[in-house]
Image (cartoon, rainbow, N blue to C red):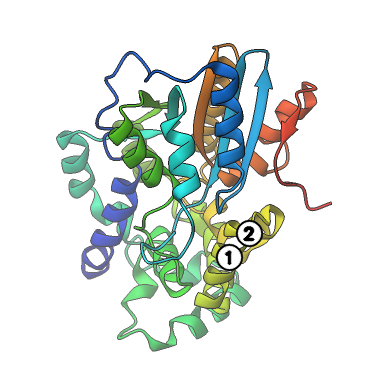
Amino acid sequence: MPAARAGLASVFALVLSMAAPPTTGQSVTDPPASDGPVTQLDEIVVTARRADMPIWEVSDGDSTVILAGAISGVPKDYAWRSDALEAATRRSDRILYPQQGRLSVGDILRLIWRIRTVAGLPADRTTADYLPPDIQARVDTVMADARNESWRRRSLLSLGLDLMEKSGYEQRGYGAADVVRRAARDARIPGDPVGTVRGDDIIDNLITAPPETHAPCIEQAVGAAEVGPAGASARLDDWRARRVPEVLASPLDRALNVCWPSGDADIAHLLRRQWSDAIRAALEQPGVTLAVVQLRVLAEPAGVLDQLQAEDREIIGPDWRAD
């Protein structure tokens, strides 16, 4: 049971991070008055383009969607200019926030009851039973400074979190979604999460997945850990400078894409489908919708931006393809 206890806090942090904070002040039904649709739209678009992050504009008649490409792991003390994003938020008609996990007390109790399954490997098994020898050797090197060898009996999910921490990734921070929530609350701009993920589905996914499911995460996460905090810092700087392909190609971002929950096929498909449907629906509403979307969901091959371009929609913003 020691391995399970060691992984409890880190697994809890990951599960609870899927439950977005409540969007306080979002019950407003009437958007704030504007100076006129044309002036308002021009000001929002121009202001949004000054933000220190990738932002795209897609329009259809009198409907405009501003896509703010957010990333996770932005430290609270990281220097990036958020004032332009705040200004664009205040002059939007509505906000679409990232998905919100719905975890009940019963879900948490169930996770506690089955924590050994989630945080530890089966009895008499170690990480070497699930990882290719070359990957295990790299993990051995990265984890050489661990206080003991208990990490070898922790689940690959829990080990992936350890490797992420060594890469310089911060689970909690203050990113684009937090900036928009604060500005929207102050300006009483209505908004909702683009969708939800049920807590029992999250727990079922964690409990039933065999250990080897998380092996691809370890392969990518150990690469990010080998680069270390310098890689995490470069990823942040590329994001701030709107170098989208460089962000997606960074070892840390590749790891985040294949590690749970993003790397789970069922969850990933649900999140991407919810965003695609919501953005198309927003383009049928008059006015301006500001959507805070994970950058990879927008800019990956066959992602939201590729889908919109395939529909012959005009997209204004930074290049998102490596070519």
Callout 1, which amino acid? Asp
Residue 8, image x and y in percent? 24, 59
Q: Residue at x 54, y 75 (%)?
A: 136
Which residue position is annotated with label 2? 241
- The quadrant in which residue 177 appears is top left
CB atoms of marks 1 and 2 within 8 Å: yes
- The quadrant in which residue 74 appears is bottom left
Residue 56, image x and y in percent? 64, 37
Q: Is residue 34 above or below residue 97?
A: above
Callout 2, which amino acid? Ala
Q: Residue at x 77, y 47 (%)?
A: 321
Left-right relation of 300 to 81:
right
Residue 79, image x and y in percent? 45, 65
Residue 301, image x and y in percent? 73, 41
Pick the residue in front: 262 or 266. 262
Q: Which mark is residue 237?
A: 1
Report whether residue 319 is seen.
yes
Number of marks present in the image shown: 2
